[in-house]
């Protein structure tokens, strides 16, 4: 069995691989990508792992580390299929850490034309030696050289027919669900979107969008309008280095989440209860027009992050509290937002690790949780008030079916569509329905539910 040992070697400025020198500079982004994959495998969300791994890297290396780690997660099934036949004792015999090293090497060989084959192999060997010593390095060297010399098909990191799930590295059960609902062609487009790195999208907070655009263009920063005018997109990857960040002029937020605020259309004098508020992007957007926003989350750590974001970019009308949405800490109010925990299938492009966390069992569990949260937050809506239910999921059980079942249980509520919202982004029932393959942004769902006076 091929197992990495616990021994780790001390990093040096350069490593010699079969007479060639692997520079520390060339190895650094690969080390960062490997660290991200290791942490994701241990359960840490991709974005948190990435932020910690690349913070000391220069911008080009940050971009490469991001592309490598996200690329491996987006094409893991296809990578494993290419690597497995080249391991004499079988893919199952390879230690998890060496699988990540091999995937990094294979992704560079198959998907990054600008990376020479010898650089992909040599840096992977250096990573393997760090993880498991010389024997691990020799094993990785042999497998990747076989792969480099093979005449197998090029890695298709964007997904294509006829093997949608396998080629695009998505769970087969989920792809079959999408194919049944959207058809093969549209499902393939969704998979391609999920396997494409999205641009950074910035939303106005304490400054107007026109002011931000003018300021960034004056600083030589290229920005373009996001779909439906919901924010500005840029190729920059460090929002903290953009003019206006420290003073809270903007926040990082996908257009779909910004459009939710438009769809919700809450009255400007409302006191709003945001039941699952962290990390706070929607809270900040709501706070620009509301009288007050009570922003709650059940996890104290997430509330700490929420409070930091509100302090940087909020209006001062938002207040962060630790609270369980199943037990709202407020008296009945005129406006309640429940952005419910969900499978997150609309955000796979931004969260490439999330596809490997979903399961049919998780979907059933989340359905039950959403039902309980809806019933609880409904009690916090005053007569005549508005409950806005939202998810970042594409699954009907979490979206329109969940709302239909809620309305059956609560005849005192009815759907109230936003008649001024773009029809292209709404379902036949009048709910917000954003699909990545059609609208070129994260997927999202929302329903406006009015309580009878």
Image (cartoon, helix red, strand yellow):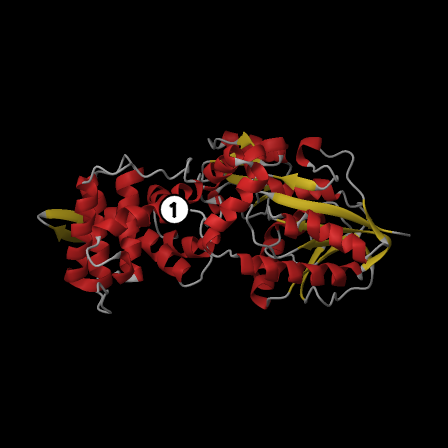
Please tell me which residue is depicted at 55% across the width and 60% down the height of the picture.
361
Q: Position of residue 220 (x, y in %)?
A: 46, 31
Q: Determine the image quadrant of residue 261.
A: top right
Q: Position of residue 40 (x, y in %)?
A: 41, 58
**Depth check, front residue: 426 or 288:** 426
Q: Is residue 417 left or right of residue 393?
A: right
Q: Residues within 10 Å of mark 1 (few under 14, many from 20)?
A: many
Residue lying at the far left of the rendered structure: 19
Residue 328 visible at all: yes
Assign the N terminus to one quadrant of the image: bottom left
In this rendering, the count of numbered labels is 1
**Vertical arrangement, residue 245 with respect to residue 336, above or below:** above
Please tell me which residue is depicted at 34% across the width and 41% down the height of the picture.
60
Please tell me which residue is depicted at 69% across the width and 47% down the height of the picture.
400
**Vertical arrangement, residue 158 with respect to residue 74, above or below:** above
**Depth check, front residue: 425 or 359:** 359
Q: Is residue 99 left or right of residue 366?
A: left
Q: Which residue is mark 1?
A: 66
Q: Position of residue 83 (x, y in %)?
A: 26, 49
Q: Is residue 420 left or right of residue 352?
A: right
**Depth check, front residue: 247 or 280:** 280
Q: Is residue 65 left or right of residue 327?
A: left
Residue 335 visible at all: no
Q: Position of residue 301 (x, y in %)?
A: 56, 65
| Mark 1: secondary structure | helix
């Amino acid at each position: 069995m091929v197992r990495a040992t616990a021994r780790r070697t001390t990093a040096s400025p350069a490593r010699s691989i079969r007479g060639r020198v692997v520079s520390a500079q060339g190895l650094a982004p690969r080390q960062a990508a490997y660290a991200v994959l290791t942490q994701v495998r241990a359960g840490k969300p991709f974005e948190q792992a990435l932020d910690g791994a690349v913070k000391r890297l220069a911008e080009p290396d940050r971009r490469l580390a991001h592309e490598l780690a996200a690329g491996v997660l987006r094409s893991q099934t296809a990578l494993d299929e290419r690597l497995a036949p080249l391991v004499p004792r079988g893919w199952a015999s390879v230690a998890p850490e060496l699988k990540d090293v091999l995937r990094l090497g294979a992704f560079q060989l198959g998907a990054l034309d600008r990376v020479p084959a010898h650089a992909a192999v040599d840096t992977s060997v250096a990573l393997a030696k760090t993880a498991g010593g010389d024997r691990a390095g020799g094993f990785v060297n042999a497998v990747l050289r076989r792969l480099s010399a093979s005449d197998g098909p090029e890695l298709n990191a964007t997904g294509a027919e006829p093997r949608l799930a396998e080629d695009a590295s998505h769970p087969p059960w989920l792809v079959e669900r999408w194919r049944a609902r959207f058809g093969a062609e549209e499902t393939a487009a969704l998979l391609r979107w999920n396997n494409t790195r999205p641009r950074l999208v910035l939303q106005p907070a304490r400054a107007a969008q026109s002011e931000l655009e003018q300021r960034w263009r004056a600083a030589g920063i290229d920005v373009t309008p996001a779909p439906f005018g919901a924010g500005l997109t840029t190729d920059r990857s460090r929002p903290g280095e953009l003019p206006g960040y420290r003073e809270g002029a903007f926040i990082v937020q996908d257009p779909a989440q910004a459009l939710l605020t438009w769809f919700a259309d809450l009255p400007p004098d409302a006191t709003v209860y945001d039941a699952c508020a962290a990390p706070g992007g929607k809270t900040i957007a709501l706070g620009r027009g509301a009288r007050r926003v009570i922003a709650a989350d059940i996890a104290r750590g997430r509330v700490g992050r929420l409070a930091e974001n509100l302090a940087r970019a909020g209006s001062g009308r938002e207040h962060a509290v630790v609270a369980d949405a199943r037990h709202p800490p407020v008296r009945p109010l005129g406006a309640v937002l429940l952005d419910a925990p969900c499978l997150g299938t609309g955000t796979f492009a931004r969260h490439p690790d999330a596809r490997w966390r979903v399961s049919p069992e998780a979907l059933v569990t989340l359905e039950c949780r959403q039902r309980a949260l809806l019933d609880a937050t409904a009690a916090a809506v005053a007569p005549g008030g508005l409950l806005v239910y939202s998810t970042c999921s594409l699954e009907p059980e979490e979206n329109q079916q969940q709302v239909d079942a809620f309305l059956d249980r609560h005849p005192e509520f009815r759907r109230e569509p936003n008649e001024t919202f773009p029809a292209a982004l709404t379902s036949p029932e009048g709910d917000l329905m954003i699909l990545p393959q059609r609208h070129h942004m994260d997927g999202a769902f929302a329903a406006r539910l009015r309580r009878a006076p």
